[in-house]
Amino acid sequence: MILSTCLAHDVGTLGRVTIIQQAQAVLFDLDGVLTPTALVHERAWRRLFETVFAHYGVSPDYTADDYLRYVDGRPRYEGVAAVLASRKLTLPIGTPEDEPGLDTVCSLGNMKNDLFTAVLAADGVQAYPGSVALLEELRAARVPVGVVSSSRNARRVLSAAGLDGNFPVIVDGVHAAAAGLPGKPAPDTYLEGARMLDVDPRGTAVVEDALSGVAAGRAGGFHPVIGVNRGAGRDALLEAGADLVVNDLAELTSAAREENA
Ligand SMILES: [Mg+2]
């Protein structure tokens, strides 16, 4: 509890390492914290639009710039519609129940989800080495860990990264939907993780790369909330409620402590 008074400032490497290893438990977000899942999404989108553009004879070709301009950060169907509009291709919206295919915006979005699974199975995804190192230390220290992710593909991603079996508790998009839990920034999915691990949020760390996830940890009364800056920005993560921000989870391992000793 003493830590809470100094965490907003730079606690130094020793402090950072101590903080996580003294946690009662640690709940990790998945995408962007344990695995660079965005790369898999990017590849799936590319395959989708290469197929669509070839089918409809649309040009110019799909580029990385299209991804950043029209797709990144948008809900799936909106991303599809924005890319089609950029090439003046109009398709009916359809409904989320549409089969994956090429006829409607929703069917394209559903096809993208299938392609995500296919790319993940074919290429796999490599967990961040710093995250793996931290997981190993937490396991050695017998600190219970869980995953709290909005993704319905969380179990597939964990398995593709070779991380399945590490987490006795996984609260994913499938679990949240079945339990009727609102998503981040609401704290409910993190609180569910703490409940399943039978730990007190006040002594449980939340590790997040998204502002909405940091806000969820803060709203749930978790401590400490650790922001991982994969692009959201250190100041924005602190403002959203992070107690401290790191660029990589390796900074929380004892190797970092020894390097800086
Ligand atoms: Mg994330």
Image: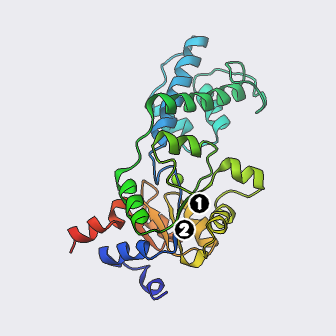
- Give the residue at mark 2: 240
Instruction: Give the class, few, some or many, for how many residues have Cα within 10 Å of label 2's Cα (few <14, many ≥20).
Output: some
Residue type highlighted by circle 1: Ser
Image position of 231 (left or right of 99) = left
- Residue 212's disc is 1
> Could you say where residue 63 lies in the image, as x and y percent from the top left?
45, 27
Residue type, label 2: Ala
The verdict on label 2 being within 8 Å of ligand 1 is no
Asked whether residue 247 appears in the rendered view, the answer is: no
Asked whether the residues under the numbered discs 1 and 2 touch, taking CB atoms below 8 Å apart as contact, a structural biologist would say yes
Choose between 69 and 40: the one closer to the eye: 40
Q: Is residue 213 above or below residue 69?
A: below
Q: Is residue 98 left or right of residue 20?
A: right
From what the image shows, is residue 180 above or below residue 18? above
Q: Quadrant of residue 76?
A: top right
Q: Is residue 230 visible?
A: yes
